[in-house]
Image (tube, rainbow, N blue to C red):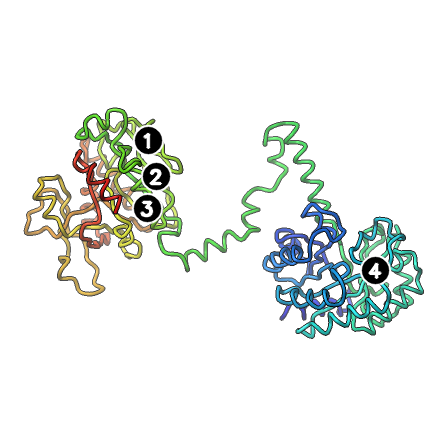
Amino acid sequence: MRKTTRFRELLLTPRLEFLLEAHNGLSARVAEEAGFSGIWASGLCLSAQYGVRDNNEASWTQILEMLEFMADATSVPILLDGDTGYGNFNNVRRLVRKLEQRGIAALCIEDKLFPKANSFLEGEAQPLASIEEFAGKIRAGKDAAQDDDFVIVARTEALIAGWGMAEALRRSEAYVEAGADAILIHSSQATADEVLAFRNEWGDRAPVVIVPTKYWRTPTQVFRDAGFSLAIWANHVLRSSLAAMQKTARALAREQTAAAVENEIAPLSEVFRLQGVAELKEAETRFLPRASRGDRAILLAATRGVELGKLTEDRPKAMVDVAGQPLLAHIVSAFKLAGVHRVHVVRGYKKEALSLPGLHYVDNDLYETTGELHSLALALDAVGVSEGALYVGYGDVLFRRHALELLLDLDADVALVVDSNWQESANLGRDADYASCSSPPTRRSFGEPVRLKRMAADLPEAERHGEWIGLLKIAPPAWNAVRETTAELLKQAKGGRPQVAALLNRLVAAGLDVQVTYTAGNWLDVDSLYDVIQAGKFSAR
């Protein structure tokens, strides 16, 4: 059902219905969750939340912008307190069209002059528009509405201005004849006598709306018995929040500690809930690339890199300058470009020198006597389990974003990138982890998974299909198996230094699905001064 239709039903139901004031998206959602079937977008409160007076100092376009947030945040209909319509009949026509475009169900306009002043500020001194002028605004608004159920409520200020009951009735009659769907009769008296007298004289010519701000002591049953259609709690959410904000601000200024208020304010989790954070998380699983779903990365960077000599006397290898930035910064940038933004770095040697901002650090203070698998175990414990994938790399291995993207959508327990140009490392005599796979890079069937069979530095050349580039991905279902297998290998090593390659072999033997994706180049292992020079060229491309 359209919001306009739902509001019209609220207006025409034989029982008394209630609207609650709201002035932004958050308060509108609070109103709906509290059980209200409709919302009053109060002119006073919309102005106040901008910090300006209720004298049309907030422009009508600013009001429209806030209304759009309110409509998006809720499913119940909204009645706008549209003051005098922000101008003449032409302004009302345009206002109605814009309200319909934003999903606002109804408009209330009052018969004062533009710019208006609040009814409770010298109300008797405020002039009223002529009946003919105001009736013209109503006709213009009804004519502009594309939806026949769009409601216009005519609010008369005759009682507020001191013009008497006869004038209030005369104006209301003319407004209904011009097309108003309901009359809002306003009073500044401390009792409900005026509005009750109006309701008795008015009869059932059109629904009557009241705003019991001043005559709040009147029991609600009186309004029910009198046959009013809607009662509006017109500013109570703003006033209650203002009191709470003032109390909190004074306490913080006085005590200078958040402990003074923490037990009296809503938890951040409640703010996130009202903002719809859970819905966004669910949507991310459907619409975002895999590497944007809370994925994380671990970079193993605990070693010095003694082969780099003086370059690492006062810093670890990962912090060696490459093209004006630390080597680690280039690696982190590749992860972030691929959508992996939470990066954990394992530090060891000169750990105080490894402190790039925006990263999460895990310290391996036993780096001199332990190996990379011990660093990985520490990081796995620190990272914990999340819904996203976990990527593992090294603090001295540069790679292009393309190499990481090869892993993003690979559906496997564990996936790794293997360079088919393994001969280069072999010719240079470098240490390397060679991979034997279920099929070589030149003989893959389209779409057929390639699986790791075995990885070893001394793998016979006849069995080599490529060199692991030091980059792998662990899917969430395999996290526990990886953590447990890592712990088991470390326990069995009895002080030895098992490598990640040993972990991969153990996972294959345990029956996990360890898949391979091939690349040709697109990475660089920085092991020597020559490599540092090459790294500068690599990062510049």
Classify residue 227 by image quadrant: bottom right
Q: Position of residue 479 (x, y in %)?
A: 31, 46
Q: Earlier in the sequence, mark 1 or mark 4?
A: 4
Q: Earlier in the sequence, mark 1 or mark 3?
A: 3
Q: Nearer the viewer, residue 50 or 406?
A: 50
The residue where tag 2 is placed is 344
CA gap, disc 1 and disc 4 = 71 Å
Q: Nearer the viewer, residue 464 or 305?
A: 305
Q: Is residue 296 above or below residue 9?
A: above
Instruction: Determine crowd level at label 1: few under 14, some 14-19, many 20+ residues with C-alpha closer than 10 A.
Output: many
Q: Is residue 339 left or right of residue 70?
A: left
Instruction: Determine crowd level at label 3: few under 14, some 14-19, many 20+ residues with C-alpha closer than 10 A.
Output: many
Q: Callout 1, which amino acid?
A: Leu
Q: Earlier in the sequence, mark 2 or mark 1?
A: 2
Q: Earlier in the sequence, mark 4 or mark 2?
A: 4
Q: Position of residue 269 (x, y in %)?
A: 54, 45
The disc placed on residue 225 is: none
From the viewer's perspective, is the residue at label 1 or at label 4 nearer?
Answer: 1
Q: Secondary structure at mark 1?
A: loop
The disc placed on residue 335 is: 3
CA gap, disc 1 and disc 3 = 18 Å
Q: Callout 2, which amino acid?
A: His
Instruction: Determine crowd level at label 4: few under 14, some 14-19, many 20+ residues with C-alpha closer than 10 A.
Output: many
The disc placed on residue 223 is: 4
From the viewer's perspective, is the residue at label 4 or at label 2 nearer?
Answer: 2
Residue beneath the point at 12% across and 39% down: 430
Q: Callout 3, which amino acid?
A: Phe
Q: Quadrant of the N terminus?
A: bottom right
The residue where tag 1 is placed is 354
Q: Position of residue 41 (x, y in %)?
A: 70, 57
CA gap, disc 3 and disc 4 = 64 Å
CA gap, disc 2 and disc 1 = 12 Å
